[in-house]
Image: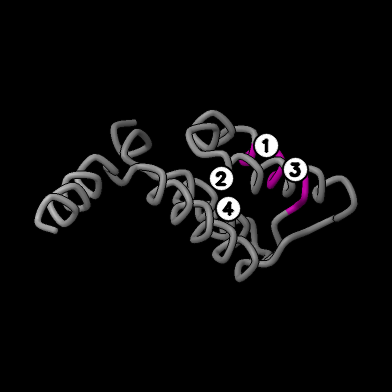
Amino acid sequence: MTEDRNLTPGDQLRTLPTEAQERGTRYVSAKAMQAKLFSVYDAAAAAEDALALVQEQLTLTLNRSYYEAEEIESMASQLDSLLALESIDLSDIDLVESDLVSED
C-alpha cells in the first residue's frame, strides 16, 4: 500500500498495460481506462492543464473500446509533465528576476 502512495498519476495509468498483460491481452478496455482516469482526477486538479487532459481523455473513453500501451504511456508522461511544471517554485524565479532588475 505504501507503494501506491508514492506513485505519480502517470505511474497509476502505467499500471494498466501490465494488468492487461496479466490477463493475457495487450489491450486495455476503455472502462478500465475510465476508472483509472477517475482515480487520478483529484491529483490532476492541481494543475489546470493536467485536469483538462484527464477530462478530455474521460470524454474520449465514451467513444472507444480499448487503448494500447503506447497511448497510455504517452498520456501518462504528459500528465506527469504537466503536474511537474505546476509544482515548480516560481518564487525562486522571481528572486532571480528582481536581482537582475536591481543591478541595472
Residue 63: image x %, image y %?
90, 52
Query: Could you tell me the amino acid type at mark 3?
Result: Leu
Q: Which residue is mark 1?
A: 35
Please say if the residues under marks 1 and 3 sit with CB atoms less than 8 Å apart: no
How packed mark 1 is, by other alpha carbons closer than 10 Å (few <14, some 14-19, many 20 or more), is few
Q: Which residues are magenta?
A: 29-37
Front: mark 4 or 2: 2
Query: Could you tell me the amino acid type at mark 4?
Result: Leu
Camera-side residue: 57 or 86? 86
Residue 50: give its label: 2
Residue lying at the far left of the rendered structure: 103
Query: Could you tell me the amino acid type at mark 1?
Result: Ala
Residue found at x 57% / y 66% = 74
Mark 2 residue element = helix
Q: Earlier in the sequence, mark 1 or mark 3?
A: 1
Q: Give the Cα separation between the discs numbered 4 and 2.
A: 19 Å
> Is residue 56 toward the left or the right of residue 46 in the image?
right
How packed mark 4 is, by other alpha carbons closer than 10 Å (few <14, some 14-19, many 20 or more), is many
Q: Give the Cα separation between the discs numbered 3 and 2.
A: 12 Å
Is-magenta flag for residue 89? no
Front: mark 1 or 3: 3
Q: Which residue is mark 3?
A: 58
